[in-house]
Image (cartoon, rainbow, N blue to C red):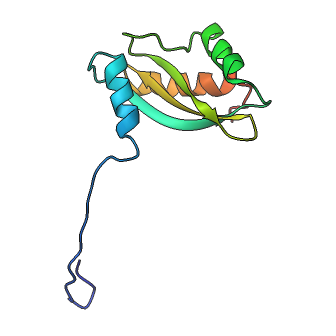
Amino acid sequence: MCTQDGTLYAWECNVRRTATTTAQAMVSRLTGGGRPAWSTGTVTGIEPMTFDKTVGHLSEAGLDCQPGESEGVLPYADRHPDGRSWRYTALAPTHTRLTELEVRLAATLGHEVL
């Protein structure tokens, strides 16, 4: 690293995808090594729901991800103590479609989309 006055400092940078490695491996496994657009995030519903009820809502809305498909939303079983917030991974063939799925996800769980 070089400061504004020209002083050089040794710097170690260990760049790797630690936070997304698990999600990337899951997406790769589910899509047979395909390369869909994907993201991870947290969505907050308007009311607390069990994991099974959340999965049911996703299925009814056509947002559930089936093995071998490259589109859908996968909620994580560990939910926030408030019962309303869910971590998820979403995948789709394109970034545009991925955005559409995330908007639909928020609407399906009762979150107002602004």
Q: Nearer the viewer, residue 105 or 67?
A: 67
Point out residue 61 in the picture as x, y percentages from the top left corner: 63, 11
Q: Residue at x 61, y 21 (%)?
A: 104
Q: Residue at x 61, y 10 (%)?
A: 59
Where does the N terminus fall, quadrant-wise?
A: bottom left
Q: Nearer the viewer, residue 99 or 49?
A: 49
Point out residue 75 in the picture as x, y percentages from the top left corner: 56, 26
Q: Position of 6 compared to 42: left or right?
A: left
Up-down: is 80 above or below 7? above
Up-down: is 66 above or below 25? above
Up-down: is 5 above or below 21? below
Point out residue 81 in the picture as x, y percentages from the top left corner: 73, 41
Residue 36 seen in the figure: no
Q: Position of 36 compared to 114: left or right?
A: left
| Occupied quadrant, residue 56 | top right
Where does the C terminus fall, quadrant-wise?
A: top right
